[in-house]
Amino acid sequence: MTLHPAPLTHKLMRDLYRIKGQAVAIGAVIAVGVMMLVMMTGLVASLSETRRTYYDRFRLADVFAPVARAPETVAQRLRHLPGVAAIQTRVSGRALIDLGGNALPIQARALSLPEYRAAALNTIYLTDGRMFDAARAEEVVVLRSFARAHGLRPGDHIAATMNGFRRELSVVGFAQSPEFLYSTAPGELAPDDARFAVLWMSRTALAAAFDMQGAFNEVLFSLSRGAEPEAVIAAADRLLDRYGAQGAYGLSHLQSDLFISEEIDGLRRSARSVPPIFLAVAAFLLYIVISRMVQAEREQIGLMKAFGYSDTEVGGHYFRMILVIAVGGALAGCLLGVAAGRWMADLYLLYYKFPFLVFRLDPASFLTGFAVSILAASAGGLLVLRQVFALTPAVAMRAAAPPDYSHSGQFSSALEHVLDQPTRMVLRRLTRQPLRMGGAVLGVAAGLSVSIAMMSILNSFSAMQALTFDVIDHSDLNVSFIQPLEARSIHDLQSLPGVIEVEPVRIVPAILRNGRALYHGAIHGLIEQPRLYRAVDADTQPITMRQGGVILSSGLARTLDIKAGDQLSVDVREGRRPRLSLPVIAVAESLLGSPAYMEIGALNRVLKEPLRISGAYLRVDATQAAKIYAALKAMPMVAGVSVKSESRAALKKVMDQGAGAMRYVMALIAAVITFGVIYNAARVAQAERARDLAGLRVLGFSRGEVAFVLLGELAAVTLLALPLGGVIGYGLTFAIAAGFSTDVYQIRPVLDAESFGLAMAVVLVAALVSGWLVKRDIDRADLVTALKTRE
Amino acid sequence: MTRNTFTTRDLRKIYGEGPAAVQALRGVTLEIPEGEIVVLLGPSGSGKSTLLNILGGLDRGTDGAVFFRDRDLAAMSDRELTRYRRDHVGFVFQFYNLMPSLTARENVELVTEIARDPMDPGEALARVGLAQRADHFPAQLSGGEQQRVAIARALAKQPDVLFCDEPTGALDSTTGRAVLNVLKEANEKMGTTVLIVTHAAAQAGMADRVIHFADGTVREVIENANKCAPEDIEW
């Protein structure tokens, strides 16, 4: 006796063909769950592994310590700090690149590399051309993404202003660096390849440009195994304090690493939370579909048992059907996961500048995908097997007694008068198996809530852009100076033709602390009633820059776990670097970045400095923009200019292409769940009631009246799911928003009627299509055959 | 002279096409007068159920004519057939076909709610002796009781014709006789034409007319002058 008798295999194939629509719908739900699992865990593995290899191979530092100016002799002492494996001093400065024409100057970071040996830390990956010749001060290696964006070639010349002096540079090569995996210009949040450059030059040349001969202004550390970064950071800060330490920070605070880490963490969280929803829904669907099949085939089951097939053989038959669907779904999911993973990996390369990023299939995710699908399906299957085992040949061969409705809804006499019989049939079915109906309602609600969450997250990105660029920032240009200047410098900007309005800003880099929580950021000094760049409250009303304390953005207040009225500790990393304790006087709404604000006069007073400004917001006449750009390029005090429209476009591009695309996929996937549940619920209801429905037709009920009895149930499930899905979606949105908010951007859920409406429309369309498919079959059903079938 | 409830002329029914085609009716010509109990006898596959289904408006003939009184059933649209079943016809099946989610009374009300001139559901149940069981669901009733509810449901609309396909096929002799009695009473008291399809030749004893079927044709039509009571039928 074999475990899989051939006739049963034939039956299996034919049964699967018969329920192909349902099998495909369930398989699709499983496939989507497995696809997400394989894709996300694969991406986590690919990104983490590639990042680790990239960091190791190019010896990215563990700790970065910027300093005003320290003599090279200090390096020896730094090298011997406990826990330090290697150090590299370097000169780092800001530069403005002028590519000629009407274009705006482009912000760049200039970094030195040792001349006659390889750098101990933060080496670069030369992709084109050659390294600079140490003897030629004008030779530079340029960040590859920037060079590509402008079509530069090795041998081209570019002009750059460094420390107020303009010089001609010769581009000799392109490079990538793990330090600039994700590169944005200072003050910008979205990467824009064309608007940010890194220039690597010889130490001698750069030291000359920034007056750093025999000195350095940044030191990089790698740590020995097991060393605590905090200890090294503290030691470095102490040692460099007298040279103007600006606050050492670990790799995890490096902007580029921060972004990629957040991306990986987000993927990891999603990989854990999203696929289980799909697999649970699939298990439920398999349970109702196969259990329905066992019910309908009880006679055949009895017959097989009467012929001498064992419980195991008969049960195995139905179990194999579950397995075929689960394995089919898992297989499709794995293949889709690999395809989606490759596509996502290519997408990631647009933003994260790895030299390569191969989608690495995590073999464990394949196994997990299969194992979890089969387990989930089996959970549904075991309940079915119990039914198969419980059937004895004799019981199975007898016609089943009519399902007992005596415990389902009884209607009060008031209702009795209102409800006609078809309506009672619908209501009794809904109440007879409340768990199953509840499951169907929950399944549809799950699909709906995912759609709602995705759409409101999508909305929140537009809201974030709108708040940042329409409410907070009314300027057209933001100009930053190479160092804080006297307040009268603002007149130089005001006097430019075409400049309509100028508003000064003083930005002071600082480490903000509250207890153990700290944030490397800056305090923005704004005028009392700013018009061009404002802080706003939760109702988007501008906040007056009152004196006497700091105003923190909501994200920052959360990071530091501080509220209005508390004292904030501020380590200023500029000038005389005082340590201040300032009261928090208000919390401002901000969805992008983590700014802190003070009234500019008050800020200068606590710094004990005369009124100084480090930049300005400008409103300009668009028709004169070219002239203004040219004038700004000619001002040696200007370290950078950012154009709001360009920042906005860059951010929008990131949201739309990367994250945005992913979220559309998620919404589509939510539709798959919704359709899978509704379609299967409809099919099962149809199969269970084929005879009742035919009976109604015989009694003289029209097709429409009969369809009401069946589709009424579907409609009730759908209508119950709408509010429930709305509530779950509401909660899910906040959970996702909290989970995905970072220092860089805060996701504030935007739950508008449109998102709810659209998500519900998806559910209703799925319900209508399912209903239509089923009604088509009812209309085609042969009355006579349906009546002869005994249940 | 009594008029005919049904008249068929050379009625044919073919299932399937080509070599797989099965001729279920091979030219049936019949007249069924109003107010009679007619029993259709014949072996399985002889075409008697097919004829019943066509007369009942559940199915259509492939060829030939079929009239209910003077109305051509073959010419009716689906909508008209539904109307015809609703207004004129009652069905009783071997497996009862009650709605399990409705009580006995509600099963009857299912029909009285849409019928033109129904009787009171309580009265219909009383006629089949189930007034006391009106609030029970089918799962709480025996087979015979379920069949009697099915008959009450069929009678409640006061149909012109009652079609019964093996109405006692799933019942024991006592219950079966009780069911046949109900059919006889309906025929006598309401003047309903009753058509019974059965394997059981003995049931022919209670018929006014017995039609013998074989191979899709009518072999013999016998008018029964000496009807017996259902109680006297041998089971």
Image: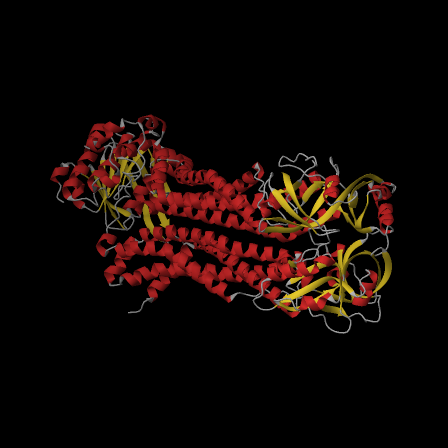
Location of residue B194 by image quarter: top left
Residue at x 79% of width, y 61% of height: A151
Location of residue A383 by image quarter: bottom left
| Residue A217 relative to residue B217: left or right | right
Residue A124 in view of the camera: no
Q: Is residue A374 above or below residue B138?
A: below
Is A123 or A105 nearer to us in this picture?
A123
Q: Is residue A275 above or below residue A55?
A: above
| Residue A601 relative to residue A418: left or right | right
| Residue B14 relative to residue A653: left or right | left
Residue A622 in view of the camera: yes
Location of residue B53 by image quarter: top left
Residue A781, given in percent of the width and then of the height, sits at: 39, 45
Q: How many marks?
A: 0
Is B39 or A565 nearer to us in this picture?
A565
Residue B123, given in percent of the width and then of the height, sits at: 23, 27
Is B96 or B22 nearer to us in this picture?
B96
| Residue A634 relative to residue A593: left or right | right
Residue A386, given in percent of the width and then of the height, sits at: 30, 55
Q: Quadrant of the N terminus of chain A?
A: bottom left
Q: Which residue appears farthest toward the bottom when viewing the image?
A: A116
Is A437 or A358 nearer to us in this picture?
A358
> Which color mode does the image show?
secondary structure
Residue A729, given in percent of the width and then of the height, sits at: 51, 43
